[in-house]
Amino acid sequence: MNLTVSYIQERIKNFKPEIGIILGSGLGDFADNFESVKIPYKDIPGFENSEVQGHKGQLIFAKVNGKNTVIMQGRYHFYEGYSMQTVTYPVKILKKLGIKTLIITNAAGAVNENFNPGDLMFITDHINFMGTNPLIGKNDDTLGVRFPDMSEVYSKKLINLAQETAEKLKIKYQKGVYIATTGPSYETPAEIKMFRLLGASAVGMSTVPEAIIANYCGLDVLGISCLTNYAAGVSNNPLNHEEVIETANKVKESFKLLLSEFIKRL
């Protein structure tokens, strides 16, 4: 971990990030319009290269509305065959680099039948349905305690600020619980019916491991899901990743506007 941090610090010099952002599928364009230092994951000791469509796989250090920000343009997924430790390693590095706030975004399927593709959903809580936990193994006391409290993984203060920002910009939003599965197969209609009974509003294949580690590290977390499709059984359409990217592209301007204004108000 020290090698990773020192490698990055050598390239960003005196730049000290205070906010971290993880950009999900189809949402990476947010990072393209800032004067920045870009470091490909494949060049960073301890990092892997993400090969999922819609993920560029690089760290971007930039000022966003006056705030020192580090942006993960793409993430690792458990379904790619990476361990949970690899999936969440970047969050630990962002903590070591000095961030206090982490904004985690994703593309997700709408489980709540009142939600629609194109809606943005602020995550109020999550259900870990991945069958494992990134904190399994020896504890790193420099990052957090062995048994972290999970009562408020997603900061109520940040959710309120995000709501106020969306309302100011007249951007429609939802709030709800995100449930994470391993993927890479999409869920069955029966599974989605079960998730709805459990109280989930949206389903995806990421975010929860990163949020667990961020909470463990003492970071304030905001989670935003871009609802890119109806989950299985909600509509008669078959699910595919191309639809995810297509819908994310349609709402990315609203997403970028919301994210930029939210950071300004932090």
Image: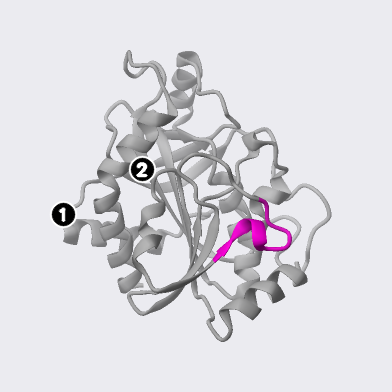
| Relative depth, front residue between 129 and 227 | 227
Q: Which mark is residue 51?
A: none
Few, some or many residues within 10 Å of mark 1 (<14, 14–19, 20+): few
Q: Secondary structure at mark 2?
A: strand
The residue at 46%/33% (across/down) is 203
Q: Is residue 192 left or right of residue 113?
A: right
Q: Is residue 169 above or below residue 125?
A: below
Q: Which residues are magenta?
A: 39-48
The residue at 68%/56% (across/down) is 47
Q: Which residue is mark 2?
A: 226
The verdict on residue 156 being magenta is no
Few, some or many residues within 10 Å of mark 2 (<14, 14–19, 20+): many
Q: Is residue 225 left or right of residue 147?
A: left
The x, y position of residue 27, in whole percent, is 39, 49
Q: Amino acid at mark 1?
A: Lys
Q: Quadrant of the C terminus?
A: bottom left
The picture quadrant where one finds residue 66 is bottom left
For discs 2 and 1, the disc positioned in front in the rendered view: 2
Q: Of marks 2 and 1, which one's residue comes earlier in the chain?
A: 1
Q: Is residue 47 above or below residue 234?
A: below
Q: Which residue is mark 1?
A: 170
The picture quadrant where one finds residue 169 is bottom left
Q: Amino acid at mark 2?
A: Cys
Q: Quadrant of the N terminus?
A: bottom right
Q: CA distance from mark 2 to mark 1?
A: 16 Å
